[in-house]
Image (tube, coloured by chain):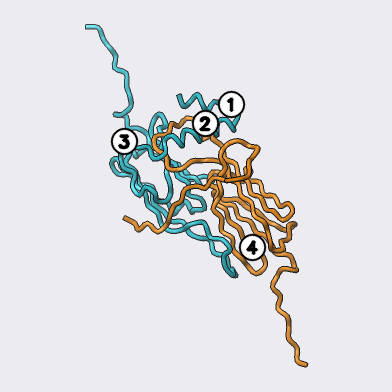
Chain colours: A orange, B cyan
Amino acid sequence: MTEQEIATKEKQQVQGQEKTRAGRFFLPDVDIEELSDSLKLRADMPGVKQNDVEVTLNNGILTIVGTVSSESYRKLQPLYTEYNVGNYFRQFELNEDIDAQRINASMRDGVLELTLPKSERARPRRIEVNAR
Amino acid sequence: MALLRYSPELDPVTNLIALQGDLERFLRNPGYGLGVSGSGGFPPVNIFDAGDGIAVIAEVPGIDPNSISVSGQGHTLTIKGERRRETSTDAAGYHRRERSFGEFSRSIQLPEQLDLDKATATYEAGILTVKVSKAEAAKPRQIAVKSA
């Protein structure tokens, strides 16, 4: 049998903040990578299509919401389950200087990829040293 | 029974909540009996009765569908694949690293006589759905009663 390298975890339900929408919300797993001129955020939201993602940036708070539909389960009767399905919600406070106008978002195969470009001020700058 | 709950007249939110309740009820259902290997392994699977067969649904976001292998032998369905991390050039490091990657393999013993020739597997929005229909012999059939 193949060595099981990859781990699985239970989906985490969103605690605390009450949503106006009913139904459970789960926290998507997220990777955040630091590049020299931007941050790259990738969130796993399987079952969420491009049109069902909402990304907003307000007062330094980045909010990601992904909604799923129960349509495809209509004719199915559960026999054995290991995971639940539901909408996704996650928020981050951005402490980097991010250029909100140039945030790029794309969705593919249930993975949301956000490119958050750093504003000029936040980019590492090489300062030239002259002779005196 | 279940079909009534997800009716198109009800709003999507009510249907989703009903679905969540059902999925919770069948969590690790011991009544299912036959083996699901690597329980607790990736990816978590949900198994459904689709009426005319079985549907196995797993969440495997961000995978190249060509890297997934779905195979069947006898009563056993095996799902294998690999999830590869995207690499960015010029990355200085991670602030968060929650998503997991690597090879995975899960085998499921399906209870009915299934016709693997009629199996289909689709991958959409990160969800892998494998449908296997019942073999002809296993389908309920009407037997005509003739008077002698």
Determine the CA span between mark 1 and mark 2. 11 Å
Residue that protrudes farthest toward the left in the picture? B148
**Residue for badge 3:** B111
Rendered view: A103 above or below A48: below
Q: Position of residue B30 (x, y in %)?
A: 34, 37
Circles 4 and 1 in contact, beta carbons < 8 Å: no
Report the chain holding disc 2: B
Residue that protrudes farthest toward the bottom in the picture? A132
Q: Looking at the rendered structure, which numbered label has been put on residue B10?
A: 1
Determine the CA span between mark 4 and mark 2. 38 Å
**Residue for badge 4:** A39
Residue drawn at 44 percent across, 34 percent down: B25
Report the chain holding disc 1: B
Along the polypeptide, which appears first: circle 2 or circle 3? 2
Both labels 4 and 3 in a single chain: no
Secondary structure under tag 3 reads loop
Report the chain holding disc 4: A
Q: Looking at the rendered structure, which numbered label has been put on residue B18?
A: 2
Along the polypeptide, which appears first: circle 3 or circle 1? 1
Along the polypeptide, which appears first: circle 1 or circle 2? 1
Secondary structure under tag 2 reads helix
Q: Amino acid at mark 1?
A: Leu
Determine the CA span between mark 4 and mark 1. 41 Å
Both labels 1 and 2 in a single chain: yes
Q: Quadrant of residue B8?
A: top right
Q: Position of residue A30 (x, y in %)?
A: 56, 55
Residue drawn at 73 percent across, 86 percent down: A129
Q: Nearer the viewer, mark 4 or mark 2?
A: 2
Circles 1 and 2 in contact, beta carbons < 8 Å: yes
- Badge 4 crowding class, 10 Å Cα cut-off, few under 14, some 14 to 19, many 20 or more, is many
